[in-house]
Image (cartoon, rainbow, N blue to C red):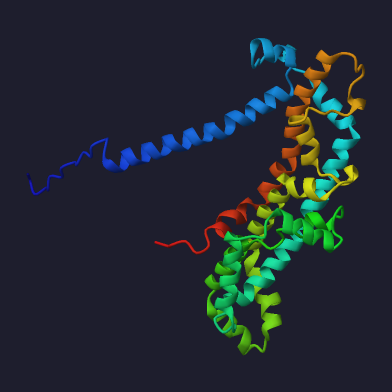
Amino acid sequence: MNGKTAVKKIHKPMFTQDNIIKLLGNLLLIVFLLLIIVPVLYILLCSIMDPAVRSSVGVSFDIRDWTLEGYRRVFRDDNIWRGFRNSFLYSIGFTLISVVVTIFAAYPMSRDDFMGRRFFNAVFVFTMFFGGGLMPTYLLMDQLKLINTVWAVLLPGALNVWNLILARSYYRSIPGELREAAEVDGADDVQYFFRVLLPVCTPIISVLCLYQFVAQWNSYFDAMIYLDDQAMQPLQLVIRAILVQNQINPNLIANMEKLAETAKLADLLKYSTIVISSVPLVIMYPFFSKYFEKGIMVGSVKG
């Protein structure tokens, strides 16, 4: 060997157990991605496709078969614009109320020295599984004179127990040395909460805002039950009328005698309104995505 040590190259087999697991994981991710992307692309294409062509030949990628008539009709409809405005205001108001209530309620529940913490925890968890039901809730709202008001949409469900548990877990994950340092500097509970705790809770606050905004934006049941005034209805009820009831504003149709044209327009408007209603969520998510993973993984096991 001339004093030289021979080094044997170790050839690892290509199909090891780890490689197979990674390959299966990547395949599952691709399948899940396709399950999400394909319906979105289908709705997007249907919103710009002539209904007659789609019903005869299916999805077409020929630009000559595309039309923006659905979007033009949607943007000219006052009901859709009014519903869009109402949904945006309801979602903003609901998010503010819910997040403020949640972060304030979760803080004492995260303190070990809070007297009655276990009792209140049990009460909150109990409400996750048992509720009063629709009729008692409606009677309560009626006695409080909240029927057909904005508060009938904003107040029910403002305190979400699951979000409360998330915020409490995030508070408890913050090192206790931070509070001890604040006490040494002379900070009381109020100063510690606003000046020290909240600035480091940006991830969980962002997650709560995203959760509540999306939930309220997609919600229509409370508005359908408690709101009688059509001018106060959110966008989801307008879309529901188009999707389920096939009701269209007469101003959208130039000639009411053409039933076939009406059916085609209703079919086109269904997809156009779905796309438009998803735009705020698509715009909103990138601003909260950098906090989403950190906030949602609170309490997870670290290896």
Q: Relative to residue 185, is residue 144 depicted above or below?
A: above
Q: Is residue 166 visible?
A: yes
Residue 128 horizontal side relative to residue 301, left or right: right
Residue 199 horizontal side relative to residue 246, left or right: left
Total marks placed: 0
Q: Residue at x 37, y 41 (%)?
A: 22
Percent x, y of residue 69: 82, 21
In the depicted view, which residue is nearer to us: 4 or 45?
A: 45
Q: Is residue 171 visible?
A: no
In the depicted view, which residue is nearer to us: 204 or 213?
A: 213
Percent x, y of residue 254: 92, 19
Q: Quadrant of residue 224?
A: top right
Q: Residue at x 67, y 56 (%)?
A: 133
Q: Relative to residue 136, is residue 184 depicted above or below?
A: below
- Farthest residue toward the top? 56
Q: Relative to residue 70, is residue 301 depicted above or below?
A: below
Quarter of the figure that contains the N terminus = top left
Q: Residue at x 53, y 31 (%)?
A: 34
Q: Residue at x 72, y 39 (%)?
A: 278
Quarter of the figure that contains the C terminus = bottom left
Q: Quadrant of residue 154?
A: bottom right
Percent x, y of residue 255: 92, 16
